[in-house]
Image: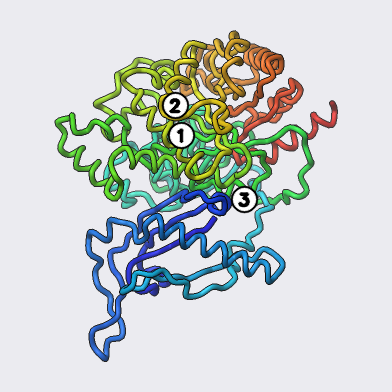
Amino acid sequence: MVVINGSYGLGEMVVQGSVSPDEFIVFKPALQKGYKSIIEKKLGVKYKMMVYGDRADERVKIIPTEKGFQQRFCLDDEQIVQLADWVSKIEDYYSTIKKSWTPMDVEWAIDGLSKELFIVQARPETIHSRKAHNKIVEYSLLEKDTKDKLIIKGIAVGDKIGSGKVNILFSMDKRVLEGHEFNAGDVLVTDMTDPDWEPIMKKASAIVTNKGGRTCHAAIVARELGVPAIVGCGDATEILQEGSEVTVSCAEGETGFVYSGAIAFAKNEYDLNDLPLIQTPIMLNVASPSMCFQFSHLPNSGVGLAREEFIINNYIQIHPLALMRHHELNDAALTKEIQKRIYGYKNEEDFFIKKLSYGVAKIAASFYPKKVIVRFSDFKSNEYFNLLGGKYFEPHEENPMIGWRGASRYYSETYKPAFGLECKAIKMVREEMGLDNVVVMIPFCRTVEELIKVQQVMKEFGLERGENGLELYLMAELPSNIILADEFAQHIDGFSIGSNDLTQLTLGLDRDSSLVAHLYDERNAAVKKMISKLIESAKRNKVKVGICGQGPSDFPDFAQFLVEQGIDSISVTPDSVIKTIKAISSVELLR
């Protein structure tokens, strides 16, 4: 990558950290092939600038930045690409001289009069490039007898330990969103989270919820953020005391424990170079573009699941139909908010496509040229409802988990234009940014007829299986996908088993209900038979079959079962890589 920071005026404000500069990221391999490979643009907070003074005794002065300039990027796309190209050439030059890769720290400027772009300094970069990426940390409590300190327990998410002061929240109001009532390092205790809670979750040292199962929103986001979480505790908001110091431990197996006080714990590092070599490819489940660079250094064969809905929720935050049709609604406040957010883009469609494409591209570039399987959006109606403007376009469903979601949305006349934006974003990532390692995947597809309809809609918006090497995968998460696997296989390049939904639909339970959480188990004989049958069908039809559900991450013995069945790849959460590799190694040695 080439990472570019910039602001108006003299560069000292950027160096001092007095302003938050604009940030641009450019993907070098595609840039060198002639693609316009800008994979991210972040607008900074450029409310002031340093300029030359007007008097002899005033060399420089700080003045406010005009509002119009604050709300637009300090570089246009042509300047970003030009600068990135120059930086790449400078890096190549010094690497040739030194006969080894030499990443460079380059300073640049645009002349205030001629508007020409100049390089003003170049020196070897010595901090980021020297970070060790071959270590993984595991956590363990140092105090062995903790029974008397146990307050509450639930389902453990991840395998880390965190401590801090209890902060109980029941809703997200404006003050909380601004961080006035939640301090970094607090333990978030709540009933249940939804996508609106993510800014708070990022600041928490740990998360504890009353409700939820291993694959609820709080659990999924906590895994991606690397924050220890305990879900399905029942009455944590009543039992835990506001402001009290607690330790949240997810390092003791499938059950998570909340202890009173700050209990000392150890962090044990593992050298990735010492891990056993395995034959079964390990891929990663990556939802957050902000974490993908970090995750790319783990042992992996690519990304088995990148969720579009996480990118939409974090980067866009607006219901796609509200974005496209807000002018039809009698809601001046909504229109004003949307117009504010799309400032600097050509129009609403351009905003959605570019925002989504940046998120997908950042993940794809981090793992390039390895395969990155991107799942089209799979919000449920209640989750779409919570997006800005979602209330105007979402029905009320008694059970959204098995309602209007996944494939059934894409070809419906109501939602089809919104799905078209997703297709255009993927097309941009693959064909304009040069990230042809992106594979697309259709979730929650009930019938073969639905699959064919979705492919027809994809083609309308420029995505066709096989064209420019595009591969199409299907989430195998419904019993119908297994029963009709031979028929589905005729229209796809691979299956990816979604063990979360497959388990709940096979066993007929709600995976988010703590009342039946004890029955939720991917290792149930019925679920395992389903998976065995699918792998057999995939092999017979010569299509790939992997798994991207939570099961292999949580249960090493389940990963062993998959290897024994001959699965082509296993995709796990980043915090589960080491134990999964060890589990697979042990079973491969016995084969």
Of the numbered discs 2 and 1, the one sitting upstream in the chain is 1
State how far apart marks 3 and 2 are (Cα).
Answer: 38 Å
The amino acid type found where label 3 is placed reads Phe
Q: Are marks 2 and 1 in contact (CB under 8 Å)?
A: yes
State how far apart marks 2 and 1 are (Cα).
Answer: 8 Å
**Residue visible at 41% across and 24% down in the picture:** 460
- Tag in front: 3 or 1: 1
**Residue visible at 50% across and 46% down in the picture:** 362
Percent x, y of residue 470: 56, 31
The amino acid type found where label 2 is placed reads Asp
The amino acid type found where label 1 is placed reads Glu
Per the image, the residue denoted by label 3 is 265
* Image quadrant where residue 147 sits: top right
- Tag in front: 3 or 2: 2
Percent x, y of residue 354: 39, 43
State how far apart marks 3 and 1 are (Cα).
Answer: 36 Å
Q: Is residue 274 left or right of residue 296?
A: right
Per the image, the residue denoted by label 1 is 308
**Residue visible at 68% across and 36% down in the picture:** 282
